[in-house]
């Protein structure tokens, strides 16, 4: 019998709050169907696995196979859905994360260009991440499938989901257009809090 250890996260905004960048329909499928399936699958797989009592991050760091795939997707999606807010014009980072971006990439514009390129050129399904290492230095990485930077000791701060289910309803095959649009809905306060929690 499956456990109920993990539950679907409650979105910190209404399903329609991110429109027109991400439609209510996409949120309903992506959060309500895809993420719910990962939660259900992980709870079923945890029975007698040895991972039952571990926090989600530790499962992602230590598991493999189906347990890793579903745990990784839950962690990734919780970070993903938790970083958004209603669209804003000229939505720029502030605080310590803004200073760190300027320090490590030269400018926000240069960071955006590299981040979008890494997202657009990742082959197949996966994620592009902004993370911080133990010294607070920022790095951009591409992670295949359910991969997460915590597996390499990094602190994940910001992610764009490049699995097709994240954008296909709204953008069809235009992944670069989707990535470009996401900047207006990033809640930089959340990203800054993650950075300062290192």
Image (tube, grey):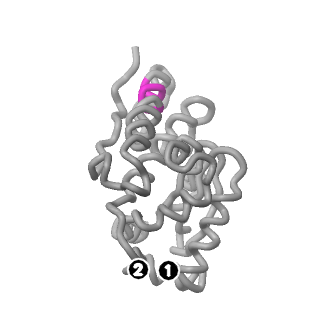
Q: Secondary structure at mark 2?
A: helix
Residue at the extreme top: 1
- Region rendered in magenta: 38-43
Compared to 161, does 106 lie above or below?
A: below
- The residue under the point 31% across, 49% down is 16
Q: Position of residue 59 (x, y in %)?
A: 50, 39
Compared to 158, does 80 lie above or below?
A: above
Check contact, mark 1 vs mark 2: CB within 8 A: yes
Compared to 118, does 127 lie above or below?
A: above
Q: Dot 2, how many residues are within 10 Å of its Cα: few (below 14), some (14-19), or many (20+)?
A: some
Q: Position of residue 111 (x, y in %)?
A: 58, 75
- To which residue does mark 1 refer? 100
Q: Is residue 64 magenta?
A: no
Q: Position of residue 15 (x, y in %)?
A: 31, 46
- The residue under the point 50% across, 48% down is 170
Q: Nearer the viewer, residue 6 or 87?
A: 87
The disc placed on residue 8 is: none
Q: Position of residue 32 (x, y in %)?
A: 38, 35
Residue 32 left/right relative to 131: left
Examine the image and state in which quarter residue 5 appears: top left
Q: Is residue 42 magenta?
A: yes
- The residue under the point 47% across, 32% down is 38
Tell me how far mark 1 sits from mark 2, CA to CA.
6 Å
Q: Secondary structure at mark 1?
A: helix
Residue 136 left/right relative to 1: right
Compared to 49, does 134 lie above or below?
A: below
- To which residue does mark 2 refer? 96
Q: Dot 1, how many residues are within 10 Å of its Cα: few (below 14), some (14-19), or many (20+)?
A: many
Magenta part mainly helix, strand or loop? helix
């Amino acid at each position: 019998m499956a456990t109920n250890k993990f539950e679907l996260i409650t979105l910190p905004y209404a399903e329609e709050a991110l429109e027109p960048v991400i439609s209510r329909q996409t949120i309903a499928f992506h959060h309500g169907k895809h993420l719910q399936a990962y939660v259900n699958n992980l709870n079923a797989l945890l029975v007698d696995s040895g991972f039952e009592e571990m926090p989600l991050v530790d499962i992602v760091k230590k598991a493999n196979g189906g347990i890793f795939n579903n745990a990784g997707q839950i962690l990734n999606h919780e970070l993903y859905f938790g970083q958004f807010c209603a669209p804003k014009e000229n939505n720029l980072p502030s605080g310590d994360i803004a200073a760190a971006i300027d320090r490590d990439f030269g400018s926000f514009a240069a960071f955006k260009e590299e981040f979008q390129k890494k997202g657009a050129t990742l082959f197949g399904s996966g994620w592009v991440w902004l993370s911080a290492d133990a010294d607070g230095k920022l790095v951009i990485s591409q992670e295949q499938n359910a991969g997460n930077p915590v597996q390499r000791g990094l602190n994940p701060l910001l992610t764009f989901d490049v699995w097709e289910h994240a954008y296909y309803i709204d953008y069809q095959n235009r992944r670069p257009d989707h990535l470009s649009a996401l900047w207006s809905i990033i809640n930089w306060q959340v990203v800054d809090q993650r950075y300062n929690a290192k």
